[in-house]
Every structure is written in C-alpha cells, then in structure tokens.
Amino acid sequence: MSAPPSALTPPLVAPARTSGSRSLGIVRKRTLRTLALVFLSFMAVFYLLPIYVMLSTGLKSFEEVNLATMWQLPSGLYFDNFRAAFAALRPNLINSLLLTIPAAIGSSILGAFNGYVLSKWRFRGSEVVFTLLLFGMFIPYQSILIPLVQFMQTINLYGGIPGLILVHIVYGLPIVTLIFRNYFAGVPTELVESARIDGASLFGVFRHIMVPLSPPAFAVVLIWQFTNIWNEFLFAVVLTRPSSWPVTVALNNLAGSQIVEWNVQMAGALLAAVPTLLVYILLGRFFVRGLMAGAVKG
Amino acid sequence: VRGSRDRLTAVAMLSPSVILLGIFVYGFIAWSIRVSMSDWQGLIPSYNFVGLDNFVRLLFNDRRFQIDLRNTVVFSVVFIGGAIVLGLILAILLDRKLPGEGFFRSVFLFPMAVSFIVTGVAWRWLMNPATGTRTSGLNLLFEGLGLDFLVSQWHTTAPPWGIAYVGIPALWQMSGFAMALFLAGLRSIPDDLREAARVDGASEWQLYWRVIIPLLRPALLSVVIILGHISLKIFDLIIALSGRQLALDVPAIYMWTTTFDANNFSRGAAIGILLLLSVALLVVPYLWYSRRQEAEL
C-alpha cells in the first residue's frame, strides 16, 4: 500500500490543475483523510459513550428512568437523580476535598525540596538516593499494606482523614520529586552560581530564585496529585472508617448496594468524576505534562 | 562556615522524604517479607518463622491463586496489546495534522482523569449481560442498531475469557495514555528523516514499518512498563465492575480478601511480596537503564 505524501510537508507545487497523476494523488489523499476522520470520530463516540449514559440518565426524571430506554435523551432536565446521589455522597465529597487538598500541597512542598537538592546540589550517592526514591512510585501497594495498617494503628492515625493525608503525601513523593527534579535541572546553573557569588545561601537560592520560577511545575504537580488522590481507592478503603470514607469508597459502596437504583448510581459516578474532569477541562495542559513526566523519563 | 551551613540545610530539606520513604517503602517491604514467612493467621499477630511455606502453597497448591495468575495473563494480553495497537493507530492518525486534532486528543485522554471506580460503575451498566426485557447497556444499543452479532455476555462469559472483557473499560481508561506517549515519540522524529526515506523511494507503508515504528521503541517500552505494572496490580476496576467473584479474581483482590476478611495475614503478605517481585522484574531493569542513559547524556 503506498500512501500519498504526508500532510506534514507542504506541496511544492500548487495543487490545482497539475498533471493527471498528481490530482489523482490528491483525490486519494482526501479520501484517506476522510477515512481517518471517520475512524477518529467513531473512536471519539466510544470514549464519550459512558459520559453520555451517565449524563442523560442522571438528567431524567425518576418516572422516565427505565433500562429499556437507557439510550434515549431525557424529555427535559430533571435533577432528581443528582439530588439523590448528592444527598448520599455529600459527606464523602467533603471528605475527599479535606483529604486531597492538604495531601497535594504537602507532597508538592516536600517534592520541591527534594527536586531542588537532587538537581542543583548533587552529592556523592545522590543518583542512588534519587533512584531509590523513584522506586516507591512503582511498588504494588499490596506489598506494604499490612505493615502500613499496623503502623497507622500504632501511631494512632488509623481510621481517619489525617492518617490518609500522611499516606498520600508519602507515596506521592516519588513522582513529585521526579517532576521537580527534571524541572529544576532545566534552570541555568549560572543563575544559581551568580546568586551564590552575591552571598545567597542554599535556602536563599531556593526561596528567591527557584520558587519564583516554579509556578508551572507547581501547577503540574498539584493537579497531578489532586487527580490521583481524589481517584484513589485502595488506601482509602483499607485505612478509613465509614465516617471518613472519601467519595471513591462511598461510590463503590453505593454501586454494590441492592437498594440504590442504577440511575442514582450513574448520577453518583458523574458527581464523583466532576471535580477531576473540571480540572482536566480547565487545566488539561498541566495534567498531560504530569502524565508524560511519569513515563518519558521514568 | 557557609558551606557547612548549606550542607545542613540540604540535609534538612531532603531528610524528611528520605526517612518517610525509607520507612514506608523499604521498612514496610522488609516487614511484609517477615509476615509472609510467618504463621500469622487470625487477629492476633504471630511471627513464628515458617520459611517459604506460604509461597510454596500459593504457587503450587492453591487453585484460587492459579486462577488469579491465569486471569492476570489474559487481562494483561488484552489490555497491553490493545493499548499498543489502539494507541499507535490513534497517534499515527493524529500526527497527520487532521482538523480537530486537539479535540480528538482531549477526548481520548480525558478518561485518564477519572477514577477506576467511576469507570467500573459506568461500565457495569454498559456491559450488563441481562437478557430479555432486562436487556440494557451496549447489548440494548447493538440490538437497536441491528448489530445483534455483537451482543455479548461481556465479563460474565465463562472463564477464562470473562476477564478479557474487563480489558474494554481498562482500554477505555488507559489507551489515551499510550496514544499520548506514541504521539510524543512521533513528534520527536525529525521531518528530515521522513523526507530522506521518501527520497530513497520508500512507500508510506515502508516508511512507517521500517523507519518510524522502530524509532518509537522507547515510547513502546514506557507503554509496556507503565501499563504492565498497572495490569499486575489491577484491583479497583474489577471491584467496581463486578464486586468480588471468583471468576474475575486477581492477586490484588485475593490479597485483600484473604487479609482483611479471612484474617490470613501471612498469606496476604506473601501475595503482596509476589506482586512486588513481578513488578520489580519489570521495573528495575527499566529504572536502571533509563537512569544510566540519563547519566550518559
């Protein structure tokens, strides 16, 4: 199969009214582009399908809800399902906020410290330290779960949100350190050196040079941590009592219940997804950078 | 004087994280290994050393764990293989500067921002296997569109294939990630290289097979590592999709139930350590390789 030249390279000759073979090539190129667009649109429908079902089900009235008419649009905008789901999940949505925000900020600050020292103040063995820190990103948490529960019970942080905050700060450190280290490595060393000549201390350089330069890195890290911690399930289900459940645990419980109708479950699922989806829609750029940071230079 | 004060500051900035991760990662792994070699079954901890008994039992004498391993393999093949194929196709198409590229990219990536629990709850209704008047979800849609041959039992299909269908929501969630990595790889290939291949008479097909896809090997490696370790520890998606059924059991679910429902802590720890070993086999060479590569730059 030979395809026409890539769309990346502009044609050297004006496309219109050239030789026969060239215009044939352009027709084929158009057909292929149309086919590609059709395929991409089909895939977009696949990716949006669950959102459509959650949204259209959520907006139906209780009377309208019926598995047989699942795919039909609602006759109007009713908020019964969302109201019922919100009533069930409200305390857990609040728990998730109380958990996610301090944990994201805490791990970002510690990660910025680490990234700074490991990129600009390398010492003998600093690469080893960094690699050992990074490994924490990949461990299956099942391998530390039992000691973790025992430890949290021993230090009296089992069951509540503060303990879960601590756990998310700790296990967030590897990825956050990685992002800050790579970001700070890009800051010119001359900048650091000239500040040193002016008498700045190690912390002075951090405070007056690095921090003012790092809002983009903080945005990436905070958004990444916010999304991950909001969506996390395993630590939450193992380490918290029902009154401290974040929204993922409560939603899973709702979905497993025989009493709660599927339409309310769908509305609940969408409610649980709204905060991270909003962040993605508004600040997706930073989210994608966090995504790539964990992979490209793992 | 300034030097030693700075050294103290550096230690002060780094040590909280080093200490915390030292305890929470390495200390806890060591402790888990100890539990995994003990006879702790029940609410009261017991650390009598029994060697590798728990591991031997799991690996050679435990029907459930063997089902779990089979399920993990089937799931991983569908999930990782599917993500590579789908991600590569989407990336190659998006790389051709089609109209709406930004929109498509955002749509393919947004499921990454959603919890596996949300995904599981939504897909539990989309992949509802009920028949007759209770037909719903995708089956209902397929019947409505006259695509009856696509109607399926989904994840309730007889083992071992039921778990393969769990790959669909997993792909829905993560294939955009593979696409993003491949797209970044494609964008880093200089245009000159493509031009040179074309000048040499390569067809577009050859250009991709012989030149471009081989250059995507680093991206492919990242996709396999990241998705591979996710698929080894897959847990929340299955819980939210179908609760706990033996047919869809995986090591992470076994670990959870045997530890926290059956209080068999030593066996739970052994499963955790086996998971860790399998992930380490995948990740350690990769970490070592990529750190060394970076050091060479």
Image (cartoon, coloured by chain):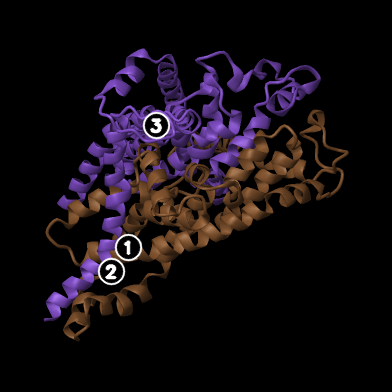
Residue A45 visible at all: no
From the viewer's perspective, tell me whether residue A138 is left or right of residue A61.
Answer: left
Kind of residue at disc 2:
Val
The foreground one among B148 and A54 is A54
Q: Which chain is purple?
A: B
Graded by Cα atoms within 10 Å as few (under 14), some (14 to 19) or many (20 or more), the crowding at tag 1 reads many
Q: Is mark 1 on a helix, strand or loop?
A: helix
Q: Residue at x 45, y 44 (%)?
A: B95
Question: In whole angstroms, how far apart are the C-alphas of marks 1 and 3?
Answer: 42 Å
Q: Position of residue A31 (x, y in %)?
A: 57, 34
Query: Which mark, residue A183?
Result: 1
Chain bearing mark 1: A
Q: The brown chain is which one?
A: A
Circle 2 sits on which residue? A187
Q: Are marks 1 and 3 on the same chain?
A: no
Chain bearing mark 3: B
Q: Residue at x 22, y 82 (%)?
A: A200
Question: In whole angstroms, how far apart are the C-alphas of marks 1 and 2?
Answer: 7 Å
The quarter holding residue A50 reads: top right
Query: Which mark, residue B265?
Result: 3
The foreground one among A207 and A293 is A207
Kind of residue at disc 3:
Phe
The quarter holding residue A91 reads: bottom right
From the viewer's perspective, tell me whether residue A137 is left or right of residue B137.
Answer: left
